[in-house]
């Protein structure tokens, strides 16, 4: 393991935190919140100082990284970066202690959208700051899925990756910055478009900005408490729902479409014929139909919009009567499914479930015809059983972590049904799931131990379960 390269890239990560804080400093100045401007300025200086020192002392050292280095960096990045991102929450007095501040940073950075804070009690610049953290977390999530997880064979078989994202052996870190720029540009384009359309639709500019950044990253944090219908019109909420679904779509497909000077019908058709995207549409359709069964056709608009929020793992709550009328077990099950593999969405991911079901059905067919040799057919290709080992391992690991999270939260004093919902919300990176399943359960009521457990669950859900479990292996760190 090349320690110097890990330190170098962590230094770059802390400089990225400083950049986000400087953008928030600008927002504080524009909003005439001078105390917050000082806090963002001081926090940016500290993050830049530490990041700059780490980068300078390691920049001339070995440049070769291994897959073990990439995995170690992935784990250290997700744990250490929120430490710096939590500083403004703590210094502003928005949180009572460092643990609560770290929880807020982890929740925003992992695009979970769980919060112990009341938006109306926060400075407007802090609302912008945590929306920027969500956006950064979404870009980082998609980038890492391409650069590190796919390179380590943790991304899942059959994931669409454009030629732009093709990686060669030993090229894991070399293209990290380049790919992050492409991913960031794609998501920034979507966020700007969403902001403009929502503003045209009558949504206040600050709310439109925060919601746009949150939607494209499927983050779930809102600038105001309560339902979106209180300050977001129907046109704007449709724009928001579409942005959430696109945020949960495969970034490789989106990049291929946007890089065309004039996207043609074939490119647009490819977006809708993509297997994962059809899965998203199917989930939205199922949730909408089931919701109409429970609440009536008169609420169809609300149900379709909230079904889109649910399928994308953003989890926004649009109206009082909506998707939350469905049984909690149904909502939890669909939340755990998640979105596309290379996207900002959380969950197991649609492609993995499709492949697991295909493999299981093939095995059942083999049982009825023992002498028959049959391989899984996927996208016109025959896949050997060996390709499904990592996916089954992932599913087993996900189940194991889910059970461990429930036990840990229940042992900390949370009732069993609430523990199931909290664990599902954290592991699927969909914090608002709690409000949809058990409104009486809130993150505000959690003690420090329970917040600590939730932070671990959120980080494991975002890091990817197999990568997190690999951290428990002594051989990783010995290397």
Image (spheres, rainbow, N blue to C red):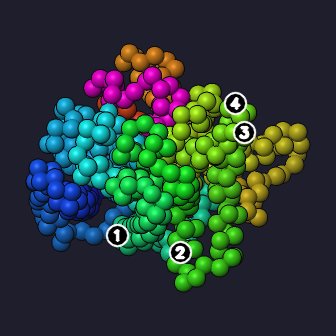
- How far apart are the alpha carbons under marks 4 and 1? 48 Å
**Label at residue 294:** 4
Q: Which residue is drawn at 45% across and 42% down?
A: 230
Camera-nearest label, 3 or 4: 3
Q: Which of marks 3 and 1 is nearer the N terminus?
A: 1
- How far apart are the alpha carbons under marks 3 and 2? 36 Å
Camera-nearest label, 3 or 2: 3
Q: How many other residues sit within 10 Å of disc 1, few (<14), some (14-19) or many (≥20)?
A: few
**In this orientation, which residue lies closer to the viewer: 467 or 227?**
227
Q: Which residue is drawn at 47% across and 31% down?
A: 434
Q: Name the residue under label 1.
A: 177
Q: What stretch is highlighted in magenta?
A: 425-451
- How far apart are the alpha carbons under marks 2 and 4? 39 Å
Q: Picture coordinates of residue 310 (x, y %)?
A: 56, 43
**In this orientation, which residue lies closer to the viewer: 27 or 62?**
27
Kindly indicate the quadrant of the structure image that contains residue 381.
Answer: bottom right
Camera-nearest label, 1 or 2: 2
Residue 442 in magenta stretch: yes
Residue 463 versus residue 247 in the image, above or below? above
Q: Which of marks 1 and 2 is nearer the N terminus?
A: 1
Q: Name the residue under label 2.
A: 258
Q: Name the residue under label 3.
A: 297
Camera-nearest label, 4 or 1: 4
């Amino acid at each position: 393991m090349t320690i110097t390269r890990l330190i170098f890239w962590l230094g770059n990560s802390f400089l990225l935190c400083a950049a986000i804080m400087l953008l928030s400093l600008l927002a504080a100045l524009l909003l005439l919140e001078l105390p917050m401007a000082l806090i963002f300025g001081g926090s940016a200086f500290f993050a830049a100082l530490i990041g700059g020192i780490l980068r300078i002392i390691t920049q001339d050292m070995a440049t070769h990284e291994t897959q073990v280095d990439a995995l170690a960096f992935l784990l250290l990045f997700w744990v250490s970066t929120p430490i710096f991102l939590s500083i403004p929450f703590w210094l502003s007095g928005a949180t009572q202690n460092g643990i609560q501040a770290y929880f807020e940073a982890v929740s925003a950075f992992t695009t979970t959208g769980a919060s112990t804070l009341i938006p109306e009690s926060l400075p407007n610049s802090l609302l912008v700051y945590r929306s920027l953290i969500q956006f950064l977390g979404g870009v980082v999530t998609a980038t890492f899925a391409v650069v590190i997880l796919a390179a380590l064979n943790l991304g899942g078989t059959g994931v669409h990756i454009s030629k732009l994202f093709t990686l060669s052996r030993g090229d894991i870190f070399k293209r990290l910055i380049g790919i992050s720029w492409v991913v960031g540009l794609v998501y920034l384009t979507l966020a700007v478009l969403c902001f403009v359309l929502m503003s045209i639709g009558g949504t206040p500019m600050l709310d439109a900005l925060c919601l746009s950044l949150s939607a494209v990253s499927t983050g779930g944090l809102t600038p105001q408490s309560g339902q979106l219908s209180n300050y977001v019109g129907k046109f704007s909420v449709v724009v928001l729902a579409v942005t959430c679904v696109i945020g949960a779509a495969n970034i490789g497909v989106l990049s291929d479409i946007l890089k065309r000077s004039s996207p043609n019908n074939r490119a647009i058709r490819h977006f809708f014929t993509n297997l994962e995207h059809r899965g998203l549409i199917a989930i939205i359709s199922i949730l909408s139909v089931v919701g109409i069964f429970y609440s009536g056709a008169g609420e169809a608009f609300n149900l379709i919009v909230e079904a889109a929020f649910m399928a994308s793992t953003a989890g926004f709550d649009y109206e009082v009567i909506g998707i939350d009328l469905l049984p909690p077990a149904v909502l939890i099950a669909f939340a755990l499914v998640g979105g596309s593999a290379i996207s900002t969405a959380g969950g197991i991911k649609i492609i993995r479930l499709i492949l697991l079901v295909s493999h299981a059905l093939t095995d059942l067919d083999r049982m009825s015809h023992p002498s028959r040799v049959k391989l899984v057919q996927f996208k016109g290709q025959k896949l050997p059983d060996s390709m499904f080992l990592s996916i089954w391992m992932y599913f087993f690991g996900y189940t194991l972590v889910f059970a461990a999270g429930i036990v840990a939260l229940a042992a900390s004093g949370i009732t069993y049904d609430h523990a199931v919902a909290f664990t599902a919300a954290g592991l699927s990176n969909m914090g608002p799931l709690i409000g949809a399943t058990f409104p009486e359960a809130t993150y505000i009521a959690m003690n420090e131990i329970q917040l600590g457990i939730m932070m671990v669950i959120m980080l494991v859900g975002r890091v990817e379960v197999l990568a997190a479990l690999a951290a428990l292996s002594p051989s990783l760190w010995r290397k």
